[in-house]
Image (spheres, rainbow, N blue to C red):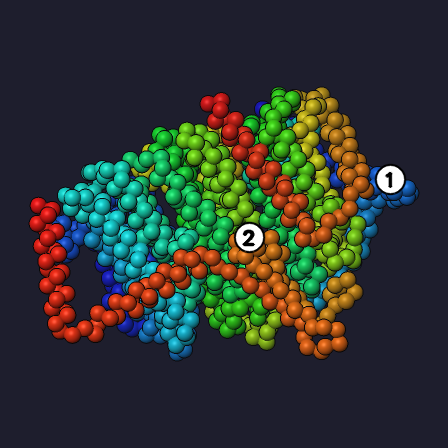
Amino acid sequence: MNRELLLQVLAQGTQMTLVLLVAPLAVGVVRTVKARLMRRQGPPLWQAYLDLVKLLRKESVLAESASWLFRSAPYVIFPLTWVAAALVPSFASGLLFNWAADVVALVALLGAARALLALAGMDVGTSFGGIGSSREMMIATLAEPAMMLIVLTLAFAAGTTRLAGVADFFVAEPLAVRVSLALALISLIIVALAENARIPVDNPATHLELTMVHEAMVLEYSGRHLALIEAASYLKLVLYISLLVCLFAPFGMAPAAAGIGGWLVGLVAWIAKILFGAACLGVWEVSIAKMRVFRLPDFVGVAFVFAFLAILLSFLARGVLA
Amino acid sequence: MGALAVAAVFAALARGAALAVVYPIATLSALILGATDLNVLMSGQDLVATLPIGLPTSGGLHLRLDSLSAFFGLVINGGVLAASVYGLGFDRERELSKRVEPYFPIFASAMNLVLLADDAYAFLFSWELMSLASWALVVARHTEAENRRAGHLYLVMAAIGTTALLFAFGGLAGTAGGYAFDAIRAQTPQPMVAALILAAALVGCGSKGGLVPLHAWLPLAHPAAPSHVSALMSGIMTKVAIYGFIRIAFDLLGPPAWWWALPPIVLGSISAVLGLLYAVLDRDLKRVLAYSTVENVGVIFVALGLALAFRANGLQAGAAVALAAALLHVLNHSWFKSLLFLGAGAVLHSTGHRDLDRLGGLIRTMPRTAAFFLVGALAISALPPLNGFVSEWLLFQSVLAGANLPQASLHFASPAIGALLALAAALAAACFVRVYGIAFLGRPRSAEAAHAHDVPLSQQLAMGGLALLCVLGGLFGSQLAAGLSPVLQHLAGSSLPHVGSGPTVFSLIAFDPSRSIYDAPVIALFVAIASLTTLVVVHRLSERKTRRGPAWDCGFPDSSPTTQYSASSFAQPLRRVYGSVAFSARETVTMPPPGDATPARFSVVVVDHIWRVLYVAPGRGVLLLAGWLNVLQFLSIRRYLVLMFSALVILLLIVALST
């Protein structure tokens, strides 16, 4: 019993470390793929690690008008994102703390991190910070309900809102092709692009543009604080790719109590899937242009409508069967 | 015990004249009453009393404190306690007024009396007393025209509400005319009569609670009152309205039919979204909070509607989850809304401004208030691990269970409810990020905000206590849900059966452990450990050097605070996305021709359709009718005699024909 528990704690710890280690690599893959498709050399694959180390080493310059909220927010935003990323089943589904938060709580944890980041963006009192926060919250009012409806659709299909239960359901029935799930997939991809500030919603490579959203919010951060904010955004990318593959391509994932052998297989499969997902994102980003800010509601609104159709269809299906 | 409770209330009432003693006595009586309520809720023993006053037909004034009233009593006395402690800090020379302090205990005790009422007469009497006392508080600062207007509208709406309730109780009593609640429970009204009673109850309680479209008075009246009274009106009095609806729909009206669920669900979800859309576009700090109350009351009505639907279909587990969501939201909202209104009061007191665009930077000048307000703002945005999320979570669980409802309209209403609630939650986050970001963060936008100071200790204590409750309520939601068991058992026929049987005692379980668990302490601990690890690791690895410098702002820092984002500019994207649909919002920019030195003009038009169609138009109709009937005042005596004679003849004809 004790050994079992120890193994579980170990597995959970592994996952927490793992998401942290893989996240910069995934970002590196996106950047490298983009650079190569644009026929540029691009930075080395591990540049994101070097960036984090560089930022940690640099001194932090705080604006004169920054309050305690600005300084402490990174120490809450990063752990919230980290915990959320660690809750999504990656290489195995039945990890120790999976039961503590379900899909609804997962969406809300990310919402908490976003609200704090938006507050931090407004703390210094500059026009760019306000522009970023205001737009981020506007996008969130469309993306968050869409996300909530997506997870409710999936939970409804699996008959449980527990993440592990949902993942187990999709491992058991990987080919459960349903219209509602297809709609949920499209919607989740749009939400993932919006939440990770990716093209066409936002451009992560920009640093002085009137259309920037995420970068405008974090403009005043520097040094170790910026390192944490950046790491949180890397983690968020891995979280969403993880969520997509765990729900829609769960092959290889170890079920609960699979033992170390199953976990190793799951681990290799998971890392391969994350890197593949990151490469796909790179291809997507070079093949499409960024949208104007006020076209965004249409784009993210599509996610909301699709998610609503998805949950409506799944309720309809239940009605017909019953 | 019941007599003691009433006596304590009246003690507060009688001493109301000596202004300064009001708050200590109110504090004490709120404590005693709260303890009584807690005792009743724990023991499950009803307290009953009959006073020899009231209608002669009903045999005295019946009072009863059962588990439902005891739960709401806890909500009310918690709020009264916070407001009274806040009141202790008022400056005795300058801040007490004969127009406020005497009415405060009357208002508090009237709300308690509504809960104690066990017959229709006592209920309506105390309901009306509550309305009038709060009206007196709304018009306390009657020298401002805006407050007089708010008071007028409130009086009209309260009169409409009480009239509707009068009809509801008339229908409940039926032809037999038994006005005691026991007599009412004994009989079941016809379906048509039940529908009328439900509609009347919805108008009566909905108008007091601020359900759209009866909400128009609320954003005017709640902010007009002194801030600690605003906290009571918004955080607590709306809960009395919800109590009234629960008492009628779940207790007095008999076994529910499934279609009873539809009106509260539809009106509630409209309120939830529309309330926040109003809030997110408003610039007045207290009015934003009042609009957000409309949203929260809407959410509670949605949960109540779902509970009715489950109960009508015999799905007791679903009814228990939905009702638990409603009641926990009642409790949670009373905490964070009171906290936010007290915080707004502190801001108003220390800066003199309610306009968001004249605030800013208060996190440095009023650090304690800012910290407490932050907790309230995050809690009301339903963010974990605070208390708002617990009720939100339970509500989403019951929405998912809505698939088990056999009626097509309810079956398909569930996903729509889920969509609207999710939208409301996201809008709430945007709304409160805006409020907090503009008022407390950034740089001060006025001299008063720059020189603000924190409020007296007792006022900090009141806010701090509520903030602590928001945190504890979020962590120990399952314990609160377990405490609700007697009420749930009584009204839904089941409680949450698996609470406490999860992996830890803090696990909140909606249906059964394999379906849904939320364990706030474990998550909080997890985040805390991660946070601590981050802190230690980062400080080991990093340089730890920090330098203060001017803001970067992409190389163009501007020293003027007016270059910051304002409340209006923060709302602009939301106004464009949602306002164009809900309020026909239009922006026009008038540019001068080239070479002309006149400034460009920017104007925004926002139309409140509900106000235009449902308030202004009938108001005009009444005036027009009054204009016509005005002729009657200036007739000669002969014509009056003819009118009276013909009225008599017509009445006699009616009597003759009907017999």
**Residue at image coords 81%, 42%:** A286
- The residues bearing labels 2 and 1 have C-alpha atoms spaced at a distance of 42 Å
Instruction: Reply above or below: A29 against B123.
Output: above
Q: Which percent across, then down, holds residue B45?
A: 26, 42
Q: Residue B394 carries which label?
A: none
Q: Which percent across, then down, holds residue B432?
A: 55, 56
Q: Residue A37 carries which label?
A: 1
Chain bearing tag 1 is A
Instruction: Count the labels in the image.
Output: 2
Left or right, B377 with reference to B132: right
Q: Quadrant of residue A64?
A: bottom right
**Residue at image coords 29%, 35%:** B255
**Residue at image coords 43%, 35%:** B410
Instruction: Reply above or below: B122 against B19.
Output: above
Q: Mark 2 points at which residue?
A: B581
Please tell me which residue lies in front, B633 or B238. B633
What's the residue type where badge 1 is placed? Leu
Chain bearing tag 2 is B
Pointer 2: residues within 10 angstroms few (<14), some, or many (20+)? few
Same chain? Circles 2 and 1: no
Q: Can residue A265 be seen in this view?
A: yes
- Mark 1, secondary structure of its residue: helix
